Image (tube, rainbow, N blue to C red):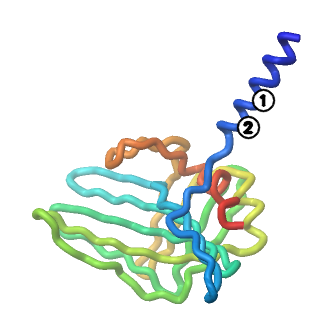
Amino acid sequence: MKKIVLLFVLFISITTFGQKQCDYSSNVTDSLGTYKSTKEYVVQERIFGGNQTSIFFSLINADGIPSLSVQIIQKSKGFVTANCFDKDSKVYFQLANGKIITLIGVDQDTCGDSFRIDEENSRIMTGYFLFMKESFEELKSAPITLMRIKYATGTVDYPMKSKLLSETDKNTYEPENYFIYYLKCIE
C-alpha cells in the first residue's frame, strides 16, 4: 500500500511540476477578433567586453494565425552594429532530432530603434515570423540545439542552452525547451 501511495504522489508531482503555465501579456477577444501573446522569454543573453545582446521570444496567436515575435536588445558603450530584418528574413531552428524548422518573416523592413541612455548606446529591434503548419508537432517534441537568424545584413548562429541564468534579471530560463513548454499556449 505504501508503494502505491508513493507512486501516486510521485506521478502527481511530476505532472504538476513538469508542465509550464501559460502567462499572457495580452489575451483579448472583441468584435475585431482574438489576440493572444505570451510574456517575453529570454532565449539568448551574451554579455562580453561592455557589450550586451539579449534575445526574447514571445508567441502570438492573432485570429488563429500563430507567429513568433523575436525581440533583440543590444547595449554597448561603443557603436551598436545594426542587423536588420527585411522581407527575406528567416529564423531556422535545428532540433535535437536533426530536423531543421524554418519560420518565414512577415514582410518587414526594420533595423530597430536606436537610442542613448546614461552614456550607453542601445538598439531594440522586433521581428515577426510565421510557423509552417507541419512544424508545430516537431517543435513540441524535440529541444532546439541551434537558432540561425537570416538578417538582411547576414546570418548569425545562436547556440541554445538547456539552462540560462540571466545576468540581467537573475531568473533561470530553459531556451532549448521553449517550444515544448509554451507552444500549447497559442494553439
Residue at (38, 74) in percent of width and height: 125
Closer-to-camera residue (153/134) = 134
**Most distant residue in the front direction:** 31
**Most distant residue in the left direction:** 119
Q: Look at the picture and state if 63 lies above or below 100.
A: below
For mark 1, give the secondary structure. helix
Residue for badge 1: 11
Residue at (19, 68) in percent of width and height: 121
Percent position of residue 131, x then y: 67, 73
Residue 170, by quadrant, is top left
Q: Look at the picture and state if 172 lies above or below 109.
A: above
Q: Residues within 10 Å of mark 2 (few under 14, many from 20)?
A: few
Q: Look at the picture and state if 144 lies above or below 82.
A: above
Residue 18, by quadrant, is top right
Residue for badge 2: 15
Closer-to-camera residue (111/42) = 42
Q: Are marks 1 and 2 in contact (CB under 8 Å)?
A: yes
Percent position of residue 20, x then y: 63, 47
Look at the image and tell me in which quarter the C terminus lies. bottom right
In this rendering, position of residue 7 left or right of residue 30: right
In this rendering, position of residue 185 left or right of residue 10: left
Amino acid at circle 2: Thr
**Most distant residue in the top direction:** 2
Percent position of residue 39, x then y: 50, 61
Q: Residues within 10 Å of mark 1 (few under 14, many from 20)?
A: few
Residue at (53, 51) in percent of width and height: 160
